[in-house]
Image: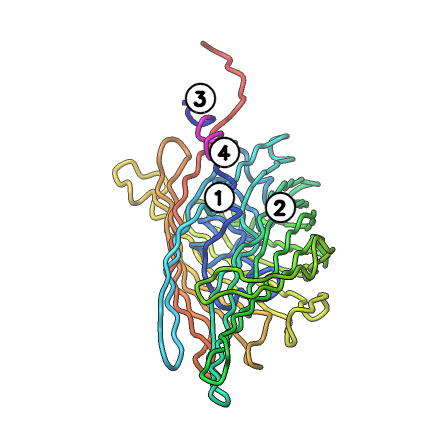
Amino acid sequence: MKIIKLGLLGLTLCFSSILSAQSISSPYSNYGVGEFLYEGLPHNYAMGQVGIGTPTPWHINLQNPAMLTYNTFSTFQVGLQTDFRRYATEQASSHTESISLRYLAMSYPIVRNKWSSALAVLPLTTTKYNTFSRDTLDNVARTVQYIGDGGLTQVVWANGFRLFDQLNVGVKAAYIFGNINKDSRVALSGEDLSTNYLVSYYETSRYSDINFSLGVSYQMKLKERNLMTFGAVSGLSKAIEGTQDITLRRLSFGGTIVQQQVIADGQQTEFTLPQYIGGGISYENLNKLRVGLDFTYTNWVNADDSDANEVRNTLLVAAGAEFIPDYQSVNSYLSRTSYRLGFNFKQLPYLENSTEINDFGINFGASFPVSGYSSMDVAFKYGFRGTTDNNLIRENYFQVVVGATINDRWFRKVLYD
């Protein structure tokens, strides 16, 4: 059995490069290094995306590394995400679908109940959009098109340490890498022009750097089976460095490059990750009920961002609950299943046409127990963002995350044969 599990681990790691090409499409991913994605796993996702102050021994917590001390099993998690998205303006509508490998993660207790470590590969940002506008001036038709794709991936190494009693601290290091391509095209056509023009400003940015964040947690026992847990996380502002190529192209209307000029080749560039601070609190009736509340404040205004004229500091609020009807039931499989529900509200940092863009989502899901302490995890989210006012785009989306969690005592010495 362990050979199969280790083989599954090796196989999925071979395909981890898929994570560097996220395919979630949104017109609001056009600034900076793209839209920052949620870092939690399905159990967090289904519970409204809480996790800063919500521990669990059965799943890996990547939101607050201090929570890793509660993982006493060797745990491996892998998951896929499907995204269905519909866009609407005042004039038209369209839709897209995508599927991608969402995360790979494993944790192992170095010193049980004292020190646990986790290694994970998951996306940090996604960039994918294709928008355009058209107008006519003096019998000349102009079409401006913006195309972008790519994103940043992070390889995370997190460690949680128990200092004394129920006080835990954690540190998370992330190696960030990835490419982002942006193409701005202007097409001019009309009877008064001797020839039609299609000009492209093409930009490729490659990033590679390291970032750190910290976490802390404390748990109080209210009664024999009732617990209250507090958590906090913080990430300092950090400029990730990279290189950039910029090319000015003249294209045919079929897309063939007619002429090009290299403006920059391998020039140094950087993007400043904003400083953030988050807090969370949860109440748990052991193996029965868990409720949690998180908030995260991100300081975008002080981040060195030259890609947008208007930016704001953002707040994310998430709340959720988990319920297990009967953890020890032997007659009902569904009674041993963990059911989750929650919601979240997120502000996007960049203003479009001086308009604030907000995101609201309702989450739900479950963990279905399988062999031993392992499970199959599913999470769903229905959300919407943006508006059709001020020539903007409203998005409605439905996401599905399906994952597997394997819990075992790896590398344990066999005492009897």
Looking at the image, can residue 70 be seen? yes
Q: Is mark 1 on a helix, strand or loop?
A: helix
The boundaries of the magenta stretch are 7-12
Q: Nearer the viewer, mark 4 or mark 3?
A: 4
x, y percent for residue 387: 45, 78
Looking at the image, can residue 170 be seen? no
- The amino acid type, in three-letter code, at marker 2 is Pro
Label disc, if present, on residue 65 of the rendered structure: 2
Q: Nearer the viewer, residue 306 or 140?
A: 140
Residue tagged by mark 4?
A: 14
- Gap between marks 3 and 2, in whole Å? 29 Å
Q: Is mark 2 on a helix, strand or loop?
A: helix
> Which circle's residue, 4 or 3, is located before the other in the chain?
3
Q: Crowding near pointer 4: few (<14 within 10 Å), some, many (20+)?
A: few
Label disc, if present, on residue 3 of the rendered structure: 3
x, y percent for residue 307: 65, 69
- Gap between marks 1 and 4, in whole Å? 9 Å
- Residue 369 placement, left or right of 245: left
In magenta segment, residue 25: no
> Which circle's residue, 2 or 1, is located before the other in the chain?
1
Q: Which of marks 2 and 4 is in front?
A: 4
Q: Main secondary structure of the magenta part?
A: helix
> Which circle's residue, 2 or 4, is located before the other in the chain?
4
- The amino acid type, in three-letter code, at marker 3 is Ile
Q: Are marks 2 and 4 in contact (CB under 8 Å)?
A: no
